[in-house]
Amino acid sequence: MSPQRFPTSTTSASSTILGDRLKFRNGPEAQNRFLKAALTEIQSTYAPNEPKKHGLPTDTILNIYDKWGNGKYGVILTSNVLVDPTNLESAGNAIIFKEGESHERRALYTYWAQLMKQDGALAVMQLSHAGRQTPELVNPSPWSASDVQLVSSARFITYGKPIPLPTELVKTEVVDRFVYAAKYAYECGFDGIQLHGAHGYLFSQFTSPTTNKRTDKYGGSLENRQRIVLEIYDAIRAEIPASTGFLVGIKTNSVEFQNEGLTLEDAKLMCKVYEERGFDFVELSGGTFEKIAFVHERESTRRREAFFVEFAEQIRPVFNKTVVYLTGGFRTAPAMIDAIKSNATQGIGLGRPITAEPDLPKKILEGDVTSAIQDHLPDLQAALRWSRWAEQAWRKLVGM
């Protein structure tokens, strides 16, 4: 029995637009418009007391990227690779850090890139720093922009009181770590990196007024709150010039969906700066751990399938040379095509659907299917309320 797919208004949709190549301002072309979005796979080793064994990709994660590497994507993003071994999104994150340097680590990341590029996709590593979204069992006192503590609806994960990052440590504890990881990715054969500036991670903690209460050069105005991201971009480009063809992109929120959070106008101003600075691509998303964007109730958005398409349509005009991807909610080829034709986006990011169907882009481009396989998983808010068995599994992962 064939799996059920999301219904579409047509049984055949021309994939011509989805198969168009995308040219980046500083580098190579993507062979089509599909982006494999970053997922939190938490399938790497967790050995915090053994740096050289900490955060290594396992056979499990490499196996799934072997599948995605044959799925005919234009760009494939890794899972979020963390740059600080003590500020993790979860036990099981992949990590790149100077203290853990080894031949084994370098060989594994090189192989990871090779798997991603098997059928012509560009391999891009997403770099992240969890900041205050580091679980308390991993680090009870993580860095953040300010000391605003995260309260999560996930019953079995708590977060400690963060420590405001001292001004004098921003360079050594954040900027230098991102630069090191970017150079590492470049040397291992990746085609670029993406800075994770969305979903409440460290960059979001600096850019959002709800979590940035600083009074130094990194706080106050939007220009100051965005400063850390631009310092990292400039530092990476000082080490890996645009002339190398190495891509530098960013994932950013189109809106945060919370009171006093980042607004649509803020997002437009930030994206204008990213365009002017020279970012190769921007991936638009939305939400934070405290206010999950993926379950907001706008009827018009539900009809149009993509979670953030209405916001993206307003942000898209600020971009000229920077390629725009939109991720979140796409399930059918007609909706993807509609988003491109409406100028909301140039590229289509896929996450949840490709966990069940790693070669979905290939099937769409070859005309075999027009939509993803239907899933029957609960919505994200419900998924955060996991039962006791999930708590026990997570505690086992961190060695409790």
Image (spheres, rainbow, N blue to C red):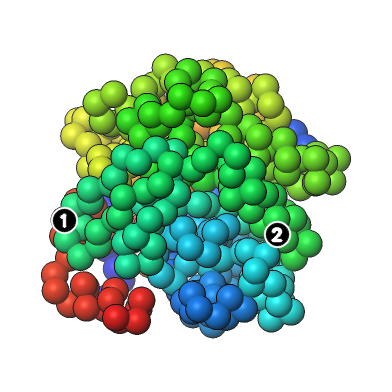
Residue 34 point in image, percent of width and height? 55, 48
- The kind of residue tagged 1 is Ala
- Comparing 210 with 355, the one in front is 210
Q: Where does the C terminus fall, quadrant-wise?
A: bottom left
Q: Residue at x 69, y 72 (%)?
A: 101
- Secondary structure at badge 1 equals helix
- Of tags 2 and 1, which is closer to the observer? 2
- Comparing 42 with 177, the one in front is 177
- Comparing 234 with 115, the one in front is 234
Q: Residue at x 64, y 25 (%)?
A: 275
**Image position of 72 (left or right of 215):** right
Residue under pointer 1:
382
Image disc number at residue 185: 2
Residue 29 visible here: no
Q: Residue at x 47, y 18 (%)?
A: 221
Residue 146 point in image, percent of width and height? 39, 38
- Comparing 171 with 126, the one in front is 171
